[in-house]
Amino acid sequence: MLYILVVAALVSFFVTLYATPWLIRYLRRIGLVVPDAHKEGMPLIPLSGGLALMAGLFSGLMTFIFFETFFSSEAGLLEMNGNSLLVLFAAATSMLIITMVGFVDDLIIERSKGESGGLKQWQKPILTLSAAIPLMVINAGTKRMLFPLFGYVDVGILYPLVIVPIGVVGAANMVNLLGGFNGIEAGMGIVYMLSLGAYAYTHGSYIAAIIAFITFAGLTAFYFYNKFPAKIFPGDSLTYLLGSVLAVIAIVGNMERVTLIVSMPFIIESILKMRGKFEKKTIGYCKNGKVFSNYDKIYSLPHILTRTGRFTERHVFWFLIVIQTFFAAIIWLI
C-alpha cells in the first residue's frame, strides 16, 4: 500500500500545483477577488483556493482507488475490501459537496465593502450538513466510543445519525473560524495532516492515513501560492474542506480523541469567537508593516499579538504554527 499511497500523494501534489495558477487567472477574470487587509495598499487577491486543493485531493483518491481495484494483488499491495473502497468514495463525495458549499459562500461578495459577505450564520450548518449524508448512508465509522467515567459505550445507530453529522458540521464550521493571514490555513493544515496521517498509519487506520497524506500533499502544493505574500486566498471552500477532512479522519479511523486534540487551536478560537458573539473579526489592518487588531480585547488567537501593534503578519503566522505544532505533537504522548 505504501508505494501506491506515494503515487497518489504525488498526483494530489502536482494536480494542485498546476491547477492553482489556472484558478488564480480564472478567479481574477470573473472578479472573485478581495482586498488583502494586512498589506499596504490592500491589493486585490483571488479568493476560493479550495477548488484547486479539491481537484488534487480528488485526483489522488481516485488514483489510489484505481490501483487498489486493478493492480493490488499483482503489485503485492494491501488488498482493501469493497467496504474500504466504498468508505473512500463516500469520503471523497462528502469532501466534494462541502467544497462546493464553501465556494458558494465565497461567491457572495459585498461589492460595497470589497469583501466576501458569505452565507448567513444559520445557513452554514444547514448547508454543511449535506456533506455528512454520504458518510451517514454507508454507516461509516465504529459504534463504540470512549466516554470519560463510562469507558467504551456502544452508541449503535446514534453514531451515523447523530455523531457523524455533528462531527462534519462542527469541524467544518470550526476550522472556518481561524484564518485571515497569508499561509495560515494551509500551513496549519500541513502540520496537523502530517501528524494525523503518521498516527493513523502507525496505528493501522489505513483509510484515515490515505486521506490525511493525500490532503497533506495537496496542501503542500497549495502553500507555495498561499504563503506570504499570498497570490491566492483559501476561502471558505478550503477551510470547509479541511474541516470535513478532519471529521472524516476521526470517523473512519476511529480517531475522535486525537483529532480533537490536534483541533484544539480551532476549539480555542471558537470559544474566543463566542466571547465576541461571532461578530468580531480576526483580521485587522496594516500600518508601517505591522498588523493591528480593531479591538482592545482578545476575540481571536491572532489578537494576542495584533492587539499590541508590534508584530508583522509573518510573526502571527509563526505564532499560530507553533501552537498547532504543539497540539499535533501531543497525540504522540498519549
Image (cartoon, rainbow, N blue to C red):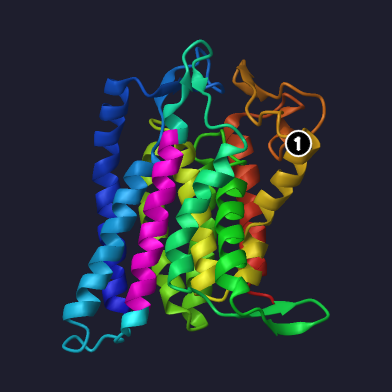
Q: Nearer the viewer, residue 107 or 163?
A: 163
| Residue 314, horizontal then vertical, whole percent | 57, 35
In this orientation, does residue 131 appear?
yes
| Residue 171, horizontal then vertical, whole percent | 59, 54
Q: Residue at x 36, y 48 (%)?
A: 53
Q: Look at the picture and state if 259 lies above or below 273.
A: below
Label the magenta part by its dominant secondary structure. helix
Q: Residue at x 25, y 64 (%)?
A: 62
**Among the 4 quarters of the image, the one containing residue 151:** bottom right
The kind of secondary structure element at disc 1 is helix
Q: Residue at x 62, y 41 (%)?
A: 177
Q: Residue at x 30, y 69 (%)?
A: 6
| Drawn side of residue 217 relative to residue 200, left or right | left
Q: Look at the picture and state if 152 lies above or below 184.
A: below
Q: Nearer the viewer, residue 166 or 301?
A: 166
| Residue 325, horizontal then vertical, whole percent | 61, 57
* Residue 154 covered by magenta stretch: no
Figure label count: 1
Magenta range: 84-104
Q: In which quadrant of the rendered image does the C terminus lie?
A: bottom right
* Residue 88 covered by magenta stretch: yes
Q: Amino acid at mark 1?
A: Ile
Name the residue carrying label 1: 304
**Among the 4 quarters of the image, the one containing residue 142:** bottom right
| Residue 158, horizontal then vertical, whole percent | 62, 72
Q: Nearer the viewer, residue 188 or 102?
A: 102
Q: Look at the picture and state if 237 lies above or below 32.
A: below
Q: In which quadrant of the rendered image does the N terminus lie?
A: bottom left
In this orientation, does residue 186 appear?
no
